[in-house]
Amino acid sequence: MKSTLLKESSIYLGGELISKALPFLLLPYLTRALGTEGFGELSYYMVWLALISIGMSMSQEGAIARYYYFYGRRALPMVMWAGYLMSGAVALVLMIIAISYGSAVGIYLTLIALLQTALGVQLSLRQCQRQSVAYITIQSLFSLSNVALTLLFLHVWQPTATLVNDRLLAMLLANGIAFMVAIRWGRQTLNMRIRPSFRQLRLGLQYILAFGVPLIFHHLSFFVKGQVDRFFIYQHYESSELGVYSAGVQLAAILPILLMAVNKALLPHFYGSLKRNQAAVRAKLPRYFVISLGGVCLPAMIAAALPNSLYLWFLGEHYGESQYYTVFYLLGYGLTVPYLIVVNYLFYLGLNKQIAAGSLISAVVYLGLLLIFGQFSMQWIPFALIISNLFLIGYLVRCVKKH
């Protein structure tokens, strides 16, 4: 059992790191190719993409995973196709709005969100059935396509005025390529040839909405804490300042990417252990939680110890101040580990409303602190994330103690 866990976890983790490393290596290229102002503009559009994705996906990946572990794989096509139809309907409405305003960026963002959602469902199906090689292959295909198309559009063609739009087009095509391969592959390996009836689609949609609607506030809270700062900075500071800020934050975002990769690898086994012996796993949670708190500050300390010249070499000569934001956002992101320990347990218990309530309150705390700190200086903004994350973890720990 332990050898199987180690093998599968290693495959997931190694593949996730490879697939995530490729887009990360684009960061120094994008900061130079787009400049501080263009990179700030791209960061602003990514905020809108994150917001659209929340309404588009309705937590379909989580709904698929929970359905599989609670009810089995027999009716998975019902849930999958219902989710695709719902996402398509939302995308159609947003496309009509974007076309009416003549917004090419709006069209790009809508289609990217649609394909990201569909691809996420395909990846969730693979993970549920522990098809680790297929999961990693699809992930890697997306990453390679994303990098190759970005270099093609921004470097080989060398357009003059639409660099940001070309980056969005590369993201759109990369998602489309990976999704089409996943669908083609899935027909052979996932037994998804079944076409559900109208009644089954209605039941599937009801299941997705019942699972996803309570989590809207949960995801909106993460949107507030992870994206709204860009809105605020874009409105109150220069685009070039947003570019420097976003570059530092994206460097720090390596940590949650790594942690989520580990979480994805271990989550099926964690849920399996809970299903076999929930009491034993529950008894170990406090010890794991305390251990995780001990490592919260370590990544930030390492980032602070690195010379500023290293950041200038990696990001470009105009990004010297990015180190400050990297250090303090690593401190905030370091709290992801204790958060995941408690929230995964609560998700298994189906306490979505409690999770959503804590996330919503935490987002309100963050937003209030952002508005206060942002009036003084951009350098105070990271502390809004740190304080609100501490509040959320404290709230979730109380929920665990009650259950």
Image: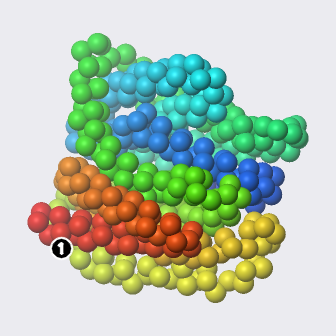
At a point 40% along the width and 36% down the height, the residue shown is 55
Three-letter code for the amino acid on which mark 1 is drawn: Ala
Residue 245 lies, in percent from the top left, at 63, 64
Give the residue number, with chain letter if any, for mark 1. Answer: 283
Please, what secondary structure does the residue beneath circle 1 have? helix
Question: In the rendered view, does 291 fall on the left or right side of 304?
Answer: left
Q: Is residue 36 above or below residue 89?
A: below
Question: In the rendered view, does 91 fall on the left or right side of 63?
Answer: right
Q: Quadrant of residue 206?
A: top left
Residue 54 lies, in percent from the top left, at 42, 40
Count numbered badges in the picture: 1
Residue at the far bottom in the pictured view: 305
Residue 19 lies, in percent from the top left, at 61, 52
Question: In the rendered view, does 381 fall on the left or right side of 137?
Answer: left
Residue 205 lies, in percent from the top left, at 29, 26
Q: Residues within 10 Å of mark 1 (few under 14, many from 20)?
A: few
User: Residue 311 versus residue 322: which sits nearer the camera?
Assistant: 322
User: Residue 55 versus residue 21: which sits nearer the camera?
Assistant: 55
At a point 32% along the width and 43% down the height, the residue shown is 216
User: Residue 7 versus residue 170: which sits nearer the camera?
Assistant: 170
Residue 174 can be seen, yes or no: no
At a point 26% along the width and 20% down the height, the residue shown is 202
Q: Is residue 157 above or below residue 77?
A: below
Residue at the far top in the pictured view: 198
Query: Colour scheme used in the picture?
Result: rainbow
Residue at the far left in the pictured view: 402
At a point 38% along the width and 72% down the height, the residue shown is 387
Placement of the C terminus among the 4 image quadrants: bottom left
Placement of the N terminus among the 4 image quadrants: bottom left
